[in-house]
Amino acid sequence: MNKQLIKGTIVGIISPMAAFIVYIAFFTEDSDPFGMYNKLLAMDKLSHALSLSVLINLLLFFMNIKTHRDEVARGVLLATILYGITIAIIKFI
């Protein structure tokens, strides 16, 4: 595999996690990410929160396309597809 593809995949996997933590820290009363994760799991809303967190990959994808880093953009797209599969599994199980 290409190093740039791996780099894009790793960035695409980590960035939604960081977006989720930033969302918890700034936009909810509960500043504990693990506590909020458990609350979302109990309310059966985890798939919704993950879907919103993955939107950061859209920005990363288009930034990489605009700067002609196609392999990194391909890795971000791969990570987004993996998140999509994970979200579908969480949603229907």
Image (cartoon, rainbow, N blue to C red):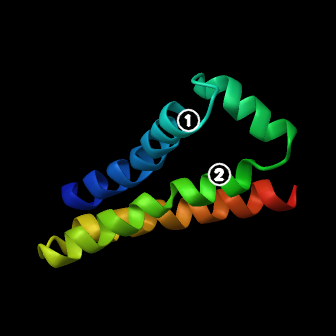
Q: CA distance from mark 2 to mark 1?
A: 10 Å
- The picture quadrant where one finds residue 22 is top left
Give the quarter of the image for residue 91: bottom right
Q: Pinpoint residue 2: horizontal percent, then vertical percent.
A: 22, 61
Look at the numbered disc 2 and give the secondary structure of its residue: helix
Residue that appears at 28% across and 69% down: 73
Q: Quadrant of the C terminus?
A: bottom right
SS state under label 1: helix
Q: Which comes before the other along the chain, label 2 or label 1?
A: 1
Q: Residue 17: x, y in percent?
A: 48, 42
| Residue 2 appears left or right of 86 | left
| Tag count | 2
On screen, residue 73 above or below 3: below
Q: Residue at x 51, y 58 (%)?
A: 54
Dot 1 amino acid type: Ile
Q: Which of label 2 and label 1 is nearer to you?
A: 1
Task: Give the amino acid at mark 2.
Answer: Ala
Pointer 1 local density, CA inside 10 Å: few below 14, some 14–19, many at least 20: some
Q: If the image is split into quadrants, where does the N terminus sit?
A: bottom left
Left or right, 38 with reference to 63:
right
Q: Residues within 10 Å of mark 2 (few under 14, many from 20)?
A: some
Question: Which label sits on residue 24?
Answer: 1
Decide if residue 8 is on the left or right side of residue 35.
left
Q: Which mark is residue 49?
A: 2
In the displayed structure, would residue 28 be above or below residue 91? above
x, y percent for residue 78? 44, 66
Q: Is residue 23 above or below residue 7?
A: above
Q: Nearer the viewer, residue 60 or 1?
A: 60
Are the two marked residues, 2 and 1, in contact with CB atoms closer than 8 angstroms? no
Question: Residue at position x 57%, y 58% from top?
Answer: 52
Residue for point 55% across, 61% down: 82
